Image (cartoon, rainbow, N blue to C red):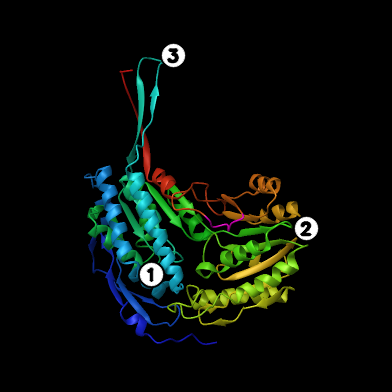
């Protein structure tokens, strides 16, 4: 099938010509990076890229910066940015849709989440970050007090993915700014436009230039320099497992915050509320075109209710219109590019060849892939062993809770999970047994708020959490001092 076509009138006003920013200032040194709509293939923006010299200049600007804004000033910058973003919600949403292909309703939701990140980061910037310890609590003690405070790092690097091109950026930048740490951002080359616009918003709101640079360019001249450089004290990365492991192997002696892939199960037990289960399965599988590390990747349904659940999910899936992402009626836009859609089409065909049944969906048009329900999926097929990053809803039947927990834990991933049940004992057993960073009862695996801890284990990450509060810990260190006054 050929690439989808659409009138480009709605893209004309979105056309962006942007530059990377070194210490807050635009730079015009490198070749142009073209950004195209995954839906239409039309050009939606260009970015002037940079090379090794600019990467090293950004690090030097960050590490030499000493005029750290006060807590109040950092909170003010974040709050001003939040207010400015609120006023430009639709503009930012349309940029996301134009470059990422996500449905406009999803892009608006992402802007709303980013507003929350800024709000929570501003709140945390004002919070007291120290503790006091009395030293006369043991026979070996003295009449002194020990105090702790958090100090910013000299330079942080953040590398972000395409699937949440604004919110993932905000989850890196907001906590770093709140902590007072200068940061260098390398966003995805597939979705750089909204990241650069967001950086402009932060600088316009008073963020000192050296506290934020945004760089795009050849991997060996930008990303590798940033990851390896000895003056970079923490690398925060969200993306694929192979790239995350390469970063871990090459970064050297520095802190790492790695949020990698997921193969998140939704376990639906025999006593589940079927209406709730179907809604969670559809929302978890299809939101954001299924391109979330916490999307439902495997639906594990008790065999006693599987036929009725499957019938209802097929009917529910018909509500998720997959079309031009700029249309208000569209609920599922494209995946990030046609190559990704072809891969997803391939794993569906592989599953069908292995005995699975495609009950609805599966058709591809360019980068659009119709939301797809597949049942009788073999437990060892690629669709459910590896992470399928798209609007797929593969159903696997389970005998009981123990069977579900064994299957859920059987992959290399350990990010999130959801369990649908009204049985408290079953819920508690699942929480204890599932080896992953999050277990949500009667919710999708991806449920969270922007300030709550988030992260995984195994190939999903090193167990270090993100979320505004935890991320601020990653972008700072604890300094301890004592005084001779009790």
Label 3's element? loop
The N terminus sits in image quarter: bottom right
First in sequence, mark 2 or 1: give its number.
Answer: 1
Residue at image mark 1: 93
151 to 409, vertically: above or below:
above
Residue at image mark 2: 399
Residue 83 or 481: which is nearer the viewer?
Answer: 83
Q: Tell whether position 445 is magenta.
A: yes
254 to 300, vertically: above or below:
above
Residue at the spot x=44%, y=55% of the render? 237
Q: How many marks?
A: 3
Q: Return the mark for residue 106.
A: none
First in sequence, mark 3 or 2: give its number.
Answer: 3
Residue found farthest to the top: 139
Q: CA distance from mark 2 to mark 1?
A: 43 Å
Residue at image mark 3: 140
- Left or right, 458 with respect to 4, comes to right
User: Could you say where residue 150 lies in the image, as x and y percent from the top left?
Assistant: 35, 37
User: Could you say where residue 387 lies in the image, as x and y percent from the top left?
Assistant: 59, 64
- Left or right, 52 with respect to 430, comes to left
Q: CA distance from mark 3 to mark 2?
A: 59 Å
Magenta residue span? 442-447
Mark 3: few, some, or many residues within 10 Å (few <14, many ≥20)?
Answer: few
Label 3–label 2 contact, CB within 8 A: no
Q: Quadrant of residue 26?
A: bottom left
Answer whether residue 229 is visible to the viewer in this image: no
Label 2's element? loop
Q: Tell whether position 98 is magenta.
A: no
């Amino acid at each position: 099938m050929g690439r989808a076509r659409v009138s480009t009138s709605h893209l004309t006003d979105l056309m962006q010509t942007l530059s990377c920013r070194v210490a807050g200032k635009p730079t015009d040194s490198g070749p142009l990076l073209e950004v195209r709509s995954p839906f239409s293939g039309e050009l939606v923006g260009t970015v002037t890229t940079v090379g090794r010299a600019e990467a090293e200049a950004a690090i030097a600007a960050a590490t030499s910066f000493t005029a750290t804004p006060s807590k109040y000033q950092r909170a003010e910058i974040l709050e001003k940015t939040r207010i400015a973003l609120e006023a430009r919600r639709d503009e930012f949403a349309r940029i996301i849709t134009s470059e990422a292909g996500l449905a406009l309703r999803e892009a608006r939701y992402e802007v709303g989440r980013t507003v929350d990140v800024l709000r929570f980061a501003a709140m945390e910037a004002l919070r007291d970050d120290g503790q006091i310890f009395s030293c006369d609590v043991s026979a070996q003690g003295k009449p002194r007090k020990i105090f702790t405070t958090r100090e910013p790092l000299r330079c942080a690097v953040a590398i972000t993915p395409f699937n949440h091109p604004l919110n993932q950026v905000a989850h890196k930048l907001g906590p770093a700014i709140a902590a007072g740490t200068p940061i260098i951002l390398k966003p995805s080359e597939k979705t750089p436009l909204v990241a650069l616009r967001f950086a402009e918003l932060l600088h316009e709101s008073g963020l000192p230039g050296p506290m934020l640079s945004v760089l795009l360019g050849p991997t060996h001249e930008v990303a590798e320099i940033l990851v390896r450089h000895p003056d970079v004290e923490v690398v925060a990365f969200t993306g694929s497992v192979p790239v995350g492991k390469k970063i871990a192997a090459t970064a050297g002696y520095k802190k790492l915050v790695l949020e990698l892939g997921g193969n998140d199960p939704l376990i639906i037990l025999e006593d589940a509320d079927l209406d709730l289960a179907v809604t969670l399965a559809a929302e978890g599988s299809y939101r954001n075109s299924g391109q979330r590390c916490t999307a439902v990747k495997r639906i594990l349904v008790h065999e006693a209710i599987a036929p009725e659940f499957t019938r209802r999910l097929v009917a529910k899936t018909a509500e998720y219109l997959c079309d031009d992402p700029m249309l208000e009626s569209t609920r599922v836009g494209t995946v990030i590019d046609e190559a990704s859609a072809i891969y997803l089409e391939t794993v569906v065909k592989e599953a069908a060849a292995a005995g699975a049944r495609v009950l609805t969906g599966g058709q591809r048009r360019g980068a659009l892939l119709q939301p797809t329900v597949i049942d009788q999926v073999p437990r060892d097929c690629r669709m459910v062993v590896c992470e399928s990053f798209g609007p797929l809803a593969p159903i696997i039947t389970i005998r009981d809770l123990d069977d579900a927990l064994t299957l859920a834990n059987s992959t290399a991933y350990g990010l999130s999970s959801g369990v649908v049940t009204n049985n408290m004992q079953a819920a508690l057993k699942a929480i204890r047994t599932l080896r992953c960073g999050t277990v949500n009862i009667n919710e999708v695996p991806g449920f969270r708020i922007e300030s709550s801890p988030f992260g995984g284990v195994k190939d999903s990450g090193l167990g270090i959490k993100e979320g505004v509060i935890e991320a601020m810990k990653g972008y700072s260190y604890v300094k301890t001092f004592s005084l001779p006054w009790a």
